[in-house]
Image: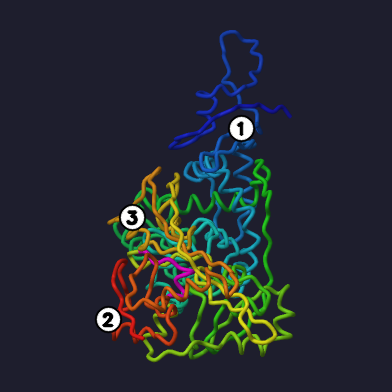
């Protein structure tokens, strides 16, 4: 088999076709000898051929193999089980896109799919749904359970808040089950079943999942057409690409390796054990005593917004990695007993304030109310280490450090806040920003709390306490809250500070003077 080679650099291509490659990019073609001088045969492309492409997303070169469209069409037919896998110009356009313009995305999906597909397949089977629907999450969220769209759709299956609640998902200040891997998948299966029952057509069900069943119904009524591909030119432009992209991604997940796109860092499904919790729980304590990294627990439970959970009427399941479960199970009673201990407060609003501070170390609230998860633990509990006689030898002190961040291409304010484990609203205050927009090269001031372990009798430890004790007035610094201000003074509660300073809400401003009464 003869292989033709070509080197292309893609920057902006609206649509691709292999015939245009042969005209514009000098594809090496084999021409058959023509014995009749009056007849010139059209040159033929010899498939398959190699193509070296440059992906702007990851700045990498990929050597891909371009296959005969006839072969691609045959493969799609072989993939058909319940859902139609057609091959036409619209599908071809997106096959070219994921193969030639975005091989990095295809590669990443090949690396991640085995983490989620076993879960998808389980719930699709339980709901009597086509297994092919597992590819839909690639298109919706790129297999990211914490994905949030500009329209505030959330999770692997990109549920809007009202649709998620309609499908039985809990969304409150502590959890967002649109990010629950299993519950959101089950909800997506049930919702897709409703859409299919309404239209009796899988392509129309997919289109309505994207744009809403009402819009598809109106298009059907206005055109009198009921076949998806007849409706395709009349569908809203934002939705027109949806089904072709779904088919293209389904193909890539099955045959991407035959085109030279290979998963190099493949991630595997993580078996879990579930425990039912019906009391208040502090995940920091649970993680520490269970010898399981908090980050791992949060990754397995992406629907949990913060690091504390209140008691809930019917309890809730918490997933722990099966490989680390034996130690937890052997010490279950003592671990859960310690993790369920909570600080005492004088009034209920203090509990909300405290939990908000704890949770803020792991979430960022956008101005429009959207929650983005994934930040590292920022609030470090006070640590005191004693000797055998009960004398304190070491303790943690926290200092605030001023840093500067230069905005890089592709960064946005929320991403920067997550990196430094601060709130986006604080960054805006520190830099006198009115909007959340940042520019490449912009220099931002960041204040970070840095915790150090020092000897209890050291100058650093004494000064961190004595300076505060001698002061009757505290000036609010960047990143301060009522809760962490109260923690600087023995026996002082949030209620005390609010009463002494006539504060009605739970917020303070940088530079505000806070009176502390001894």
**Residue farthest along the top direction in this orientation:** 37
Residue 98 is left or right of residue 497, and the answer is right
Separation of residues labelled 3 and 1 (CA atoms):
45 Å
Q: Secondary structure at mark 2?
A: helix
Q: Identify the residue at image location x=36%, y=46%.
A: 439
Separation of residues labelled 1 and 2 (CA atoms):
67 Å
Q: Identify the residue at image location x=68%, y=55%.
A: 266
Does the magenta portion include 364?
Answer: yes
Q: Nearer the viewer, mark 1 or mark 2?
A: 2
Residue of label 2: 501
The percent coordinates of residue 183 (x first, y second) are 53, 75
Q: Earlier in the sequence, mark 1 or mark 2?
A: 1
Q: Nearer the viewer, mark 3 or mark 1?
A: 3
Residue of label 3: 431
Q: Secondary structure at mark 3?
A: loop
Residue 192 - label: none
Region rendered in magenta: 357-366
Q: Secondary structure at mark 1?
A: strand
Residue situated in front as seen by the camera: 419 or 467? 467
Q: Identify the residue at image location x=29%, y=86%.
A: 499
Image-quadrant location for residue 211: bottom left
The percent coordinates of residue 427 (x first, y second) are 37, 59
Image-quadrant location for residue 74: top right
Q: Nearer the viewer, mark 2 or mark 3?
A: 2
Residue of label 1: 52
Residue situated in front as seen by the camera: 232 or 238? 238
């Amino acid at each position: 088999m003869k292989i033709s080679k070509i080197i292309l650099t893609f920057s902006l291509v609206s649509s691709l076709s292999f015939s245009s490659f042969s005209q514009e990019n000098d594809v090496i073609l084999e021409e058959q000898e023509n014995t009749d001088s009056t007849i010139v045969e059209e040159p033929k492309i010899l498939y398959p051929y190699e193509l070296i492409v440059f992906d702007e997303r990851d700045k990498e070169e990929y050597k891909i193999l371009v296959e005969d469209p006839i072969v691609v069409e045959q493969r799609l037919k072989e993939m058909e089980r319940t859902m139609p896998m057609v091959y036409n110009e619209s599908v071809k356009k997106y096959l070219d896109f994921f193969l030639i313009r975005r091989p990095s995305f295809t590669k990443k999906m090949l690396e991640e799919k085995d983490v989620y597909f076993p879960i998808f397949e389980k719930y699709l089977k339980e709901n009597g749904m086509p297994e092919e629907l597992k590819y839909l999450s690639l298109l919706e969220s790129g297999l990211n359970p914490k994905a949030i769209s500009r329209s505030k759709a959330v999770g692997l299956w990109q549920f809007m808040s009202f649709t998620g609640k309609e499908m039985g998902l809990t969304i409150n200040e502590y959890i967002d089950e649109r990010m629950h891997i299993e519950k959101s998948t089950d909800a997506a299966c049930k919702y897709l079943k409703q859409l299919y029952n309404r239209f009796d057509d899988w392509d129309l069900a997919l289109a309505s999942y994207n744009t809403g069943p009402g819009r598809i119904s109106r298009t059907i009524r206005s055109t009198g057409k009921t076949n998806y591909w007849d409706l395709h030119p009349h569908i809203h432009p934002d939705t027109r690409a949806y089904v072709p992209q779904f088919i293209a991604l389904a193909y890539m997940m099955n045959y991407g390796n035959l085109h030279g796109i290979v998963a190099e860092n493949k991630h595997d499904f993580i078996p879990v054990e579930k425990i039912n919790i019906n009391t208040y729980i502090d995940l920091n304590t649970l993680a520490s005593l269970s010898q399981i990294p908090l980050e791992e627990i949060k990754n397995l439970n992406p629907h949990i917004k913060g690091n504390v959970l209140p008691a809930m009427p019917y309890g809730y399941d918490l997933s722990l990695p099966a490989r680390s479960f034996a130690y937890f199970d052997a010490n279950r009673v003592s671990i859960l007993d310690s993790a369920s201990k909570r600080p005492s407060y004088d009034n209920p609003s203090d509990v909300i304030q405290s939990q908000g501070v704890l949770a803020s170390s792991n979430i960022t609230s956008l101005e429009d109310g959207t929650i983005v998860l994934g930040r590292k633990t920022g609030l470090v509990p006070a640590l005191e280490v004693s000797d055998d006689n009960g004398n304190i030898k070491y303790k943690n002190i926290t200092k605030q450090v001023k840093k500067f961040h230069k905005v890089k291409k592709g960064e946005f304010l929320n991403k920067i806040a997550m990196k430094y484990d601060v709130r986006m609203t604080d960054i805006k205050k520190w830099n006198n920003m009115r909007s959340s927009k940042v520019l490449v090269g912009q220099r931002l001031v960041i204040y970070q709390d840095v915790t150090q372990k020092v000897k209890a009798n050291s100058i650093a430890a004494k000064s961190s306490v004595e300076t505060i004790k001698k002061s009757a007035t505290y000036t609010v610094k960047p990143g301060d809250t009522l809760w962490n201000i109260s923690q600087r003074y023995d026996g002082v509660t949030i209620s005390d500070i609010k009463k002494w300073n006539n504060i009605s809400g739970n917020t303070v401003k940088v530079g505000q003077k806070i009176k502390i009464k001894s």
